[in-house]
Amino acid sequence: MSLKIKDFSVVYRDGDHSIQAVEEATISVERGRCLALVGESGSGKTTLGKACLGLLPGNAQTAGRIFLNDREIDFSNETLLNQLRWQRISMVFQNGAETLNPAYRIIDQVAEPLVEKGGENRKSALKRASAALFDMGLPEACHRRYPHQLSGGQVQRGLLAMAVILEPDILILDEPTSALDALNKSFVVEIIQRYKERGKGILLITHDLEFAVRHGDEMAVLYLGQVMETLPAGEMLSNPIHPYTMALGRSYPTMGTARDLGGIRGDAFYRLVHQHGRRDEAQYHHSHIQIPESAHANGHAPPTGCLFQGRCTQAIEACKTGYVNFEAVQNHQVRCLRRGIVSALSLKGVSKKYGNNTALNGTDLELKAGELLSLVGETGSGKTTLAMIAGGVMAQDHGFRTFEDRDMDEWLKNDMGTIARRIGVVYQNPAESISHRFTCMTLWPNP
């Protein structure tokens, strides 16, 4: 059983304004696989999960299609949707305690799907509900308690029991490990593995990137409602291709890996659609996207180009206006005008001698856009020589160097001034690097 979401969009209407929550998202959850859906808060993850069950609020307008086992779901048919929920697709919602009814005991709420959807009598349903709760590690003494009498981990176990009680084919988990201790988190892992082995498809919505990498099979990265990249989950932290995926991974600390927490510059903005009320119908629905570095008469950016360009470390002018396709790059799908993270600086087989002393011998180096690369080694190992060659201050004896996909030696020969403004060097021994013939004011260029 598979779940396929194709070109799906969601807009929330609010008077004369609207928020574009999801835009033409295409993802799929296959039988026996777990798809992890990640992205910043407000990127549209929960909206996409609720859309699969037809649980969006009344002010939501949708476009696109969702298929269950290659059969399109008719969201206009409430009878069909009621048959679908819990029996074919179920969801463990975020903020578990708020999802449960405080006036009913946990066992009654787990039994409810059996009575309402499965047609069982109350006695049989309560017996099965008790067995399901026990199977989720909740002792019998807790079964007749109210939600407020349970801990966060116990509530989560109750929600999982309710979600799987009718053996649905697709299980949607929305932040199932948020605020859980290590023991309860490991139990959620058990549930994911158990249901994958039984051929169930799982859509895992989470901010916990390490959890998603470890326990997801595939991953989809959302930004402002657009899928920026789909990739094998295990490659999210080790081999990202989209600049946003790399930035997201570098913003997340892990216990087992030391990494530079580079973060993402700026803030994500909601996407607003304005209705100006003009008589000209073509101008009535006037769409804007809020991007910090862009300008518009009313403070918003025109709806063109890449949504991430205002925060991207490798954005070029074309990223502001060009149409961005979602295309295959290696074994990923990437939405990037430059087909993913580009190489800013590359050295191939670079060597350098000082007389009879070899400082560098056939050295390769690649620096990607937005990357911080540390060069370490003993004194005399060639660090400064390599840095000077990379900065264009010194020429290599052999080998090649490129900067932004251009031959760096040809560039230096024909237009040294331009490349000097693109690559800056802070030299060792500052006192020896500055001319003693000029004052500091003289060295500083006039504006």
Image (cartoon, helix red, strand yellow):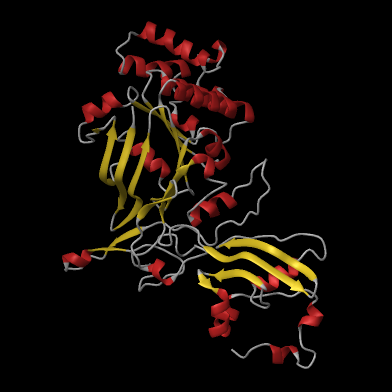
The answer to whether one can see residue 36 in this image is yes
Name the residue rendered at 54%, 33% in the picture. Answer: 177
**Horizontal and vertical percent for residue 359?**
76, 68
In this rendering, is residue 355 above or below 218?
below
State the image quarter where residue 168 is shown: top left
Can you say which quadrant of the picture contains the N terminus?
Answer: top left
Asked whether, in this view, residue 117 is left or right of residue 353, the answer is left
**Horizontal and vertical percent for residue 215?**
53, 33
Asked whether, in this view, residue 82 is left or right of residue 22, the answer is left
Name the residue rendered at 16%, 68% in the picture. Answer: 279
Q: Residue furthest top?
A: 123
In this rendering, is residue 162 above or below 25?
above
Residue nearest the viewer, comparing 413 with 351: 351
In this rendering, is residue 337 above or below 106?
below
Asked whether, in this view, residue 234 is left or right of residue 50, the answer is right
Name the residue rendered at 51%, 72% in the picture. Answer: 406
Q: How many marks?
A: 0
Q: Residue furthest front?
A: 356
Residue nearest the viewer, comparing 221 with 342: 342
State the image quarter where residue 112 is shown: top left
The answer to whether one can see residue 148 in this image is no
**Horizontal and vertical percent for residue 81?**
26, 29
Residue nearest the viewer, comparing 19 with 447: 447
In this rendering, is residue 33 above or below 414?
above
Name the residue rendered at 28%, 55% in the picture. Answer: 15
